[in-house]
Amino acid sequence: MTKVNFCERCVISTLRPTSTIEAKHTRNEKKPTTQFTDGVCDACRWAVLKETEIDWKQREDELIELCGRNRKTNGEYDVIVPASGGKDSMMVAHLLKYKYKMNPLTVTWAPNIWTEIGQKNHLNLIKSGFNNLLISPNGKSHRKLTRLAFQNIGHPFQPFIFGQRSVGPKVAIQHGVNLIFYGENVAEYGNNIMDNYNPIMDPRLYTCYDIDDQETHLGGMAIRDLYSKHGFERSDLIPYRSPTMEQVSGLGLEVHYMSYYRKWIPQENFYYAVKNTMFEPAETRTTGSYSKYSGLDDKLEWLHYYMMFIKYGMGRATADASQEIRSEKITRDEAVKLVELYDSEFPEQHLGELCEYMGLSEDEFHSIIDSFRPEHLWEKVNGRWQLKHHVY
């Protein structure tokens, strides 16, 4: 029997999964989970260390030295910033260009289904003074892969992650740039706490999407099965192909996290973006949470977080509230109430559009969701699903 405990400081549980190599993701994969020490999760332990042990001035000095080594004086791009127009990427791009005098090229892997505010903020990114390259995969193939990922692994966002994770390094190679900057290391939220002491992303995370390796998994199945059972051709998968480890190491290419060099506080990133760029929050809160300023770009992201709730008992409100406890924006008691109010909220207003996008009936859609409810988390009481373990 799976035991479920909750962090004594935030609201995540011992079921929170940590990052793995996405190209090996199958339905039966057993994911590692966030580590707890004396009842406290690694993310909360790191929040304390950020305040007490990290010399942020020294880390900024490291950033200044890094930029100095990579800055070009001939007007060419010298850093790539994957950016959707969200608050975090807007802040990273603005800091690099205006404070550290770099010449960034922002690059966007297109969302599955743009939201109105997401499209507006993407344009606002450009209007705020940044060159941008938008990369959009074949819509027919991408919808089909999204449906397969939803059906097979309960992870409709997986094809997007394939593209979004590798787009920065691929564009960097094309433009002769050796430096890429993403926002935060996922260790901020519960991956191995020691990862926070390394500014560089593990290259395995963005070189693992080898479409010529028949054992690479995309959409929850091996590449060979995409060809033989679903009619895909190699040309359909080219946008998802990552650079190789040999290319990356040979060129000296590095992907850095801004969260290593600057204390990462999502709400402060929002304030920075509003003050210094044309970023706009949504008019209403995000489905499944109380926030108006995070994850605004893609309607499918709402389903992604709902599936996290189904599979692990923790949804979007849990993620948002836990971050804000750690940065002392809200108390744990307040967070518990927010989770109770919003975590289980189904994206009903987008149901029709999500079904149409993936070519599913509503009955098929709900049947797929229910197939991913683990027995240790869910039970039916009087015909209705109920969560067995919750923080409230």
Image: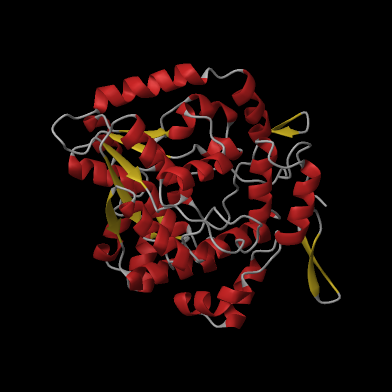
Q: Is residue 57 left or right of residue 253?
A: right
- Residue 154 in view (yes/no): no
Residue 87 image offset from top left, x and y in percent: 47, 48
User: Foreground residue, 157 or 98?
Assistant: 98
Q: Residue at x 58, y 43 (%)?
A: 267
**Which residue lies most toward the right here?**
382
Residue 141 image offset from top left, x and y in percent: 34, 70
User: Foreground residue, 114 or 370?
Assistant: 114
Check the image and report above or below for 213 versus 9. Answer: below
Question: How does the figure colour the protein chain or chains?
Answer: secondary structure
- Residue 381 in view (yes/no): yes
Check the image and report above or below for 153 versus 264. Answer: below
Q: Is residue 201 left or right of residue 385?
A: left
For residue 244, what is the image quadrant? Answer: top left
Q: Which residue is drawn at 54% across and 80% down?
A: 352
Q: Is residue 304 left or right of residue 168?
A: right
Residue 219 image offset from top left, x and y in percent: 45, 62
Q: Residue at x 33, y 56 (%)?
A: 240
For residue 231, what is the image quadrant? Answer: bottom left
Residue 216 image offset from top left, x and y in percent: 39, 53
Q: In this view, does 360 lie to the left or right of 90?
A: right
Check the image and report above or below for 273 versus 361. Answer: above
**Which residue lies most toward the front here?**
275
Q: Which residue is drawn at 43% across and 53% down?
A: 161
The image shows a total of numbered marks equal to: 0
